[in-house]
C-alpha cells in the first residue's frame, strides 16, 4: 500500500493540530495580556477552537492533495524543480 489512507491523514492532522491548540490558547492569553485586550477564557477558547478547525481542514486537504500527487501538475511551472522520477545529475 502506498501513501496514506484518508482516515490516517485525518488522525495525523488532528494529533498535529491538538498540540497547536494548546500552544495557541497560551499564546492568545499572553498576547491579550500584552495588548491589554480583555477576553474571558471561554471566549479565548472559542477563538482557538475555530482556528483549530480551520487548521485541521487545511492540513487534511493539503495532505490529500500531496498524496494524490496533485502538485505534479504545477511543478513544470517552477524553474529548477524536477519530478520525483527524473534523475538529477
Image (tube, rainbow, N blue to C red):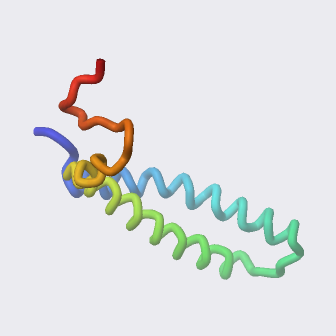
Residue at image point 77% right, 80% down? 39
Which residue sits furthest top?
89
Apparent side of residue 82 relative to residue 43 in the rendered image (left or right)? left
* Front residue of this view, candidates 28 and 65: 65
- Side (left or right) of 55 relative to 38: left
What residue lies at 37% left-to-right and 47% top-to-bottom? 78
Relative to 88, is 51 above or below? below
Instruction: Name the residue located 43 percent from the left edge and 52 percent from the top edge.
Output: 15
**Res 6 → quadrant:** bottom left
- Residue situated furthest left in the rendering: 1
Image coordinates of residue 9 in percent, x first then y, are 29, 53
The N terminus: image quadrant: top left
Q: Does residue 47 sit above or below 72 in this rendering?
A: below
Counting from the top left corner in percent of width and height, residue 88 is at 29, 23
Q: Quick check: 27 above or below 37? A: above
Q: Which quarter of the figure has residue 89?
A: top left
Count how many numbered circles sit on residues in the image: 0
Relative placement, left or right, of 64 versus 44 is left
The picture places residue 31, in percent across and down from the top left corner, at: 79, 66
**Quadrant of the image occupied by residue 84:** top left
Residue 47 in picture, x, y percent from top left? 61, 77
Amino acid at each position: 500500500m502506498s501513501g496514506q489512507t484518508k482516515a490516517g491523514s485525518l488522525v495525523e492532522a488532528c494529533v498535529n493540530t491538538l498540540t497547536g491548540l494548546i500552544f495557541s490558547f497560551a499564546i492568545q492569553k499572553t498576547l491579550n495580556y500584552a495588548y491589554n485586550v480583555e477576553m474571558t477564557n471561554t471566549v479565548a477558547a472559542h477563538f482557538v477552537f475555530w482556528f483549530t478547525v480551520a487548521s485541521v481542514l487545511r492540513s487534511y486537504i493539503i495532505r490529500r492533495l500531496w498524496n494524490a500527487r496533485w502538485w505534479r501538475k504545477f511543478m513544470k511551472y517552477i524553474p529548477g524543480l524536477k519530478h520525483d522520477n527524473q534523475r538529477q545529475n
